[in-house]
Amino acid sequence: QLQLQESGPGLVKPSETLSLTCTVSGGSISSSNHYWGWIRQPPGKGLEWIGNIYYSGSTYYNPSLKSRVTISVDTSKNQFSLKLSSVTAADTAVYYCARQGRTIILPKAAPRWFDPWGQGTLVTVSS
Amino acid sequence: DIQMTQSPSSVSASVGDRVTITCRASQGISSWLAWYQQTPGKAPKLLIYAASSLQSGVPSRFSGGGSGTDFTLTISSLQPEDFATYYCQQANSFPPAFGGGTKVEIK
């Protein structure tokens, strides 16, 4: 059974870079049928998609965060990672990683639903 | 980009009640819609995909419907473990967007 687990610092200072890693177990990250994504949820608020990566390294980012986000993949470790630069208090949130389905509809591929999700990790931005 | 709007934002109901939540997409997404359930302190859990397909292990009291721009999630007989927040997500194109959530509370 596929499982995802987020890891990284729980506290980041303003203006610094948030870095998280998601480790995938019970299956391969090198799946042609899936993307690997990051979603966040500020305390008491809704879900916000941050971005996705395909095992080949192709990335897709939320336009509202694109200038600050970098997602990368390490297929040898079955991991993918998130970097969010120049953080502020508004970036305080629970960060989830998740697998997302991928369907080929020529000439493109389309993103589907997220399943499963990691348990999430709270990242607080504070000095 | 496609925007997702859920209503109501919260609903109070009793055990055994039938509850319906609505999700509207800003443009047509065929049947490319998913529903998630989130309980406090937990990650969202996929309930329904492709608008009406029940994820494995999800009780049959949950059902989804709709296509195009208007979708519904129905809980036929609310159980204590169903008190949670529910989110829809458009699964048609990038960027994948979530609705604002509907909190189902105990009356």
Image (cartoon, rainbow, N blue to C red):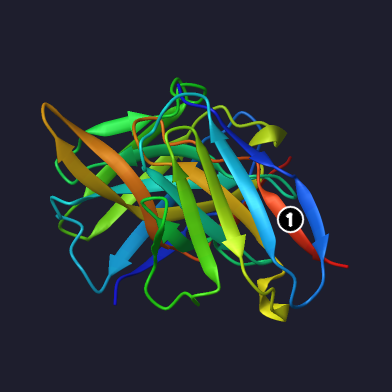
Residue type at tag 1: Lys
Q: Residue A121: image x %, image y %? A: 56, 59
Q: Specify the quadrant that holds the N terminus of chain B.
A: top left
> What residue does disc 1 label?
B103
Quadrant that contains the C terminus of chain B: bottom right
Q: Secondary structure at mark 1?
A: strand
* Any part of residue A8 in sight: no
Q: Residue at x 39, y 29 (%)?
A: A61
Residue at image coords 36%, 30%: B94
Residue in the image at 48% along x and 44% along y: B89
Mark 1 belongs to which subunit?
Answer: B
Near-viewer residue (B63 or A45): B63
Image: B90 above or below B45: above
Q: Is residue B40 left or right of residue A63?
A: right
Q: Is residue A2 above or below residue B52?
A: below
The quarter holding residue A86 reads top right
Give residue A54's position: percent from left, percent from top: 22, 42
Q: Nearer the viewer, residue A45 or B88?
A: B88
> Pointer 1: residues within 10 angstroms few (<14), some, or many (20+)?
many
Q: Say whether residue A91 is visible.
A: yes
Residue at coordinates 11% horizontally, 30% vertically from top-left? A106
Q: Position of residue A52 (x, y in %)?
A: 34, 40
Residue A93 lies, in percent from the top left, at 64, 47
